[in-house]
Image: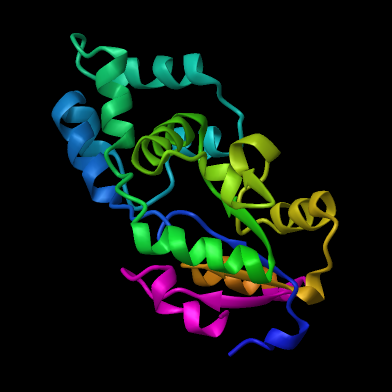
């Protein structure tokens, strides 16, 4: 349980905390469009070159498409690649939107997510279509790894948020669904709340409100 009296700022993760995700959907989608021998040789348990490169902004969209065109069937078009890539992104449930609004009334609220330009376009557009507001408007500021150049659990990602938000680590709690991200946040002086696997913000909201 966190010490609410000392917490002024809350940083929320996105995938697995606010937005439901299912990475196996993307794996299955790529299975349908990739060359079979290449698909069978990929270790999907490891972060792929494409994912890491996109999440720190190392690759632009052209490099992304060039990479996948080499390993997908010759007939595959860019739209199919985007659809497969985005298949893991599910929904941002309404009850979590209301929870975020409640948190924003009590804390300085920020978003820190390991994500990439293609996923950002997908979930921000879906959110706007569903709720008729812009996702970033729910927060004091959003920090996407592909835009800041660092991804969790690198300490630089947390320092970047603290510095650019002008907030103190000892007054801040990180809410994330990955143990390594929570431990790194704690190592630099923040408090953390670990969201249980396959749950979401609703599983830990009582610790904050």
- Against 177, residue 93 (above or below) is above
Nearest to the observer: residue 186 or residue 104: 104
- Against 52, residue 162 (above or below) is below
Nearest to the observer: residue 197 or residue 48: 197
Image-quadrant location for residue 144: top right
Labels in figure, total: 0
Where's residue 198, x and y in %? 31, 68
Residue occupying image coordinates x 52% and y 39%: 134
Where's residue 16, x and y in %? 40, 60
Which residue ends up furthest to the top in the rendered image?
Answer: 75
Query: On the rendered structure, is 104 left or right of 26?
Result: right
Image-quadrant location for residue 158: bottom right
Residue occupying image coordinates x 34% and y 55%: 20
Does residue 17 appear in the picture of this structure?
no
Residue occupying image coordinates x 79% and y 70%: 169
- Against 43, residue 169 (above or below) is below
Colouring convention used in this rendered image of the protein? rainbow
Bounds of the magenta span?
186-209
The C terminus: image quadrant: bottom right
Where's residue 36, x and y in %? 15, 28
Residue occupying image coordinates x 51% and y 44%: 135
Does residue 179 appear in the picture of this structure?
yes
Where's residue 53, x and y in %? 54, 34
Is 189 covered by the magenta stretch? Answer: yes
The N terminus: image quadrant: bottom right
Is 105 covered by the magenta stretch? Answer: no
């Amino acid at each position: 349980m966190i010490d609410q009296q000392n917490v002024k700022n809350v940083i929320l993760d996105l995938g697995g905390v606010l937005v439901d995700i299912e990475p196996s959907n993307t794996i299955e989608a790529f299975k349908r469009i990739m060359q079979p021998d290449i698909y069978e040789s990929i270790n999907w348990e490891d972060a792929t070159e494409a994912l890491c490169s996109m999440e720190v902004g190392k690759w632009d969209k052209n490099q992304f498409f060039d990479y996948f065109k080499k390993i997908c069937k010759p007939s595959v078009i860019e739209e199919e690649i985007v659809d497969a890539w985005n298949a893991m992104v599910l929904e941002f449930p309404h009850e979590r939107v209301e929870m975020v609004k409640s948190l924003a009334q009590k804390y300085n609220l920020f978003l820190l997510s390991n994500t990439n330009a293609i996923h950002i376009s997908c979930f921000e557009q879906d959110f706007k279509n569903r709720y008729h507001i812009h996702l970033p408007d729910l927060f004091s500021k959003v920090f996407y790894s592909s835009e800041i150049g660092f991804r969790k659990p690198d300490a630089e990602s947390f320092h970047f948020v603290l510095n650019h938000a002008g907030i103190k680590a000892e007054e801040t709690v990180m809410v994330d669904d990955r143990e390594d991200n929570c431990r790194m946040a704690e190592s630099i002086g923040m408090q953390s709340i670990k969201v249980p696997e396959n749950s979401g913000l609703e599983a830990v909201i009582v610790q904050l409100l």
